[in-house]
Image (spheres, grey):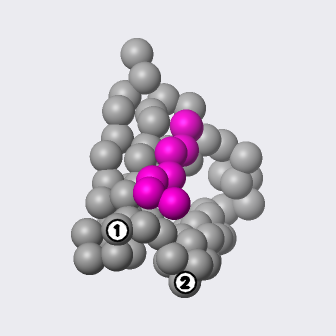
Amino acid sequence: MKSMIMVARREIHILMPPREDGYFSRRLLRDIVRCFLIRLSARSLSQHFEAYDEIWIFIAADLDPGFWKMRIP
């Protein structure tokens, strides 16, 4: 897989694999899911149902893949 695209409430987030890999490995996909669950669990239960666009920024910073986002007007 060359990229992952997530459409959130107000933004489109695109994650690219690290340059040295060229594609997402199974290990990196597991790390992304694990990081997503950890970041989500850090929020209060009432916030789990709110849109959380910033989570992808944190995941990109944690795992260091390429990252690009576009604001939806």
Tell me if 36 is positioned left or right of 46 in this view. left
- Asked if residue 4 is positioned above or below residue 43 in the image, the reply reads above
Q: Circle 1 sits in a helix, a strand or a loop, which is it? A: loop
Q: Which residue is mark 1?
A: 22
Which is more foreground, mark 1 or mark 2? 1
Label 2 SS: helix
Q: Residues within 10 Å of mark 1 (few under 14, many from 20)?
A: few
User: Which residue type does callout 2 highlight?
Assistant: Arg
Q: Which residue appears farthest toward the bottom when viewing the image?
A: 27
Is residue 56 visible in this depiction of the protein? no
Residue at 51% across, 60% down: 1
Query: For residue 5: magenta?
Result: yes
Q: Percent x, y for residue 56?
A: 46, 55
Q: Position of residue 33 (x, y in %)?
A: 61, 71
Q: Residue at x 34, y 41 (%)?
A: 69
Q: Which residues are magenta?
A: 1-8
Asked whether residue 53 is drawn in magenta, I would say no
Mark sitting on residue 27: 2
Q: As drawn, is 35 to the left or to the right of 21? A: right
- Regarding residue 13, the answer to whether it shows in the image is yes
User: Marks 1 and 2, how far apart in space?
Assistant: 14 Å
